[in-house]
Image: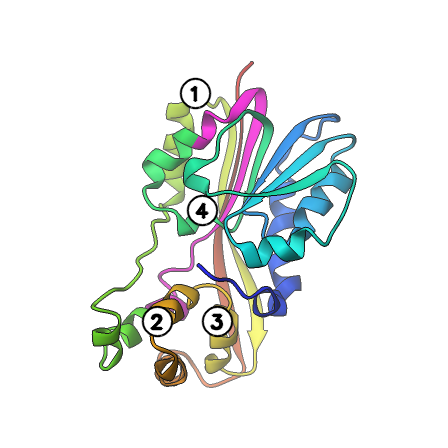
């Protein structure tokens, strides 16, 4: 997918809060190899390098646009490479993934595969948006199901692969993780009105829809989406309740 770094960072502060919560689940050790899977524009990879003494950070992302921004951030012990979650290989002391795995299907297979990339004694730390039951997401699917968008999209809509937290706990247990934490948390953001949610999702959830829609349908699709949001949610100002799954696990040595 083609990402717009500027649009994505319109809610930079709000996206940093779950990073801090996920980092708090990490057992800090010096001099480790870290994979930041889905590093985006690289700010969080640099932050990991500051918070993890003498560690070596590799930021991986599939988006050339995001990596172009990331590579402007030169730093010792940090490098950025292009790659996909589905094909990443190697061994790491910490595999850190912040807001990317919801773009990858079949988590029942994905989580065990990522676990194999973690060295004995290492850690897996993941944060995944899980807001797919909120109108911010259901209204996108509803808009895509209406004409002329349904025909233009050839009936395509994207359903989230994100699981329930007990399923992630079971996956980690089945992988052999003895020390793990799985939780779900709501991150609230105050917005002036329901339709303002569209500005948030323009940089994330709406991206694959815009890629499939002709340019002349982008604004009509946004307008329909905003109308559905206004119908589904109270009059503004509103509290946008964004739900996320966070988990961290240590692999036995």
Mark 4 lies on a secondary structure that is helix
Instruction: Tell me which residue sits at (78%, 32%) in the image.
Output: 53
Question: Badge 2 is on which residue?
Answer: 140
Q: Is residue 51 above or below residue 145?
A: above
Q: Position of residue 93 (x, y in %)?
A: 61, 26
Location of mark 3 (residue): 202
Image vertical order of residue 176 relative to residue 76, above or below:
above
Say which residue appears at 60% left-offset and 59% top-offset: 15
**For the residues bearing labels 4 and 3, Cβ distance under 8 angstroms:** no
Confirm whether the magenta stretch covers residue 133: yes
**Quick one: label 1, few (<14), some, or many (20+) residues within 10 Å?**
some
Q: Earlier in the sequence, mark 1 or mark 4?
A: 4
- Residue matched to label 4: 101
Q: Secondary structure at mark 2?
A: helix
Q: Residue at x 36, y 45 (%)?
A: 164
Label 1, secondary structure: give it: loop
Give the foreground label among 3 and 1: 3
Q: Is residue 168 left or right of residue 18?
A: left
Cα distance between the residues tagged 3 and 1 = 39 Å
The residue singled out by tag 1 in the image is 176
Q: What are the residue bounds of the magenta stretch?
A: 114-140
Q: Is residue 231 visible?
A: no
Q: CA distance from mark 4 to mark 3?
A: 18 Å
Left or right, 67 with respect to 48, comes to left
Residue 74 shows in this picture? yes
Front label number (1 vs 4):
4
């Amino acid at each position: 997918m083609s990402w717009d770094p500027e649009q994505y960072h319109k809610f930079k502060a709000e996206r940093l809060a779950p990073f801090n919560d996920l980092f708090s689940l990490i057992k800090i050790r010096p001099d480790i190899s870290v994979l930041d899977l889905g590093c985006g524009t690289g700010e969080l990879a640099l932050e990991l390098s500051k918070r993890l003494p003498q560690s070596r950070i590799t930021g991986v992302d599939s988006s050339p646009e995001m990596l172009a921004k990331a590579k402007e951030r030169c730093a010792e012990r940090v490098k950025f490479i292009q790659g996909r979650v589905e094909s990443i290989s190697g061994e790491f002391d910490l595999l850190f993934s912040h807001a990317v795995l919801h773009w990858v299907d079949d988590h029942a297979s994905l989580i065990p595969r990522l676990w194999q990339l973690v060295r004995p004694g290492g850690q897996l730390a993941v944060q995944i948006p899980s807001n797919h039951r909120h109108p911010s997401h259901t209204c996108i699917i509803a808009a895509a199901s209406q004409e002329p968008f349904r025909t233009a999209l050839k009936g395509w809509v994207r359903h989230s692969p994100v699981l329930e937290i007990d399923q992630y706990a079971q996956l980690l247990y089945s992988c052999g993780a003895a020390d793990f934490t799985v939780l779900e948390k709501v991150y609230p953001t105050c917005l002036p009105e329901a339709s303002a949610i569209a500005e948030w999702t323009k940089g994330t959830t709406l991206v694959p829809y815009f890629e499939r829609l002709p340019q002349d349908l982008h604004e009509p699709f946004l307008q329909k989406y905003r109308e559905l949001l206004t119908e589904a949610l109270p009059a503004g100002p509103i509290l946008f309740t964004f739900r996320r799954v966070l988990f961290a696990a240590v692999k036995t040595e």
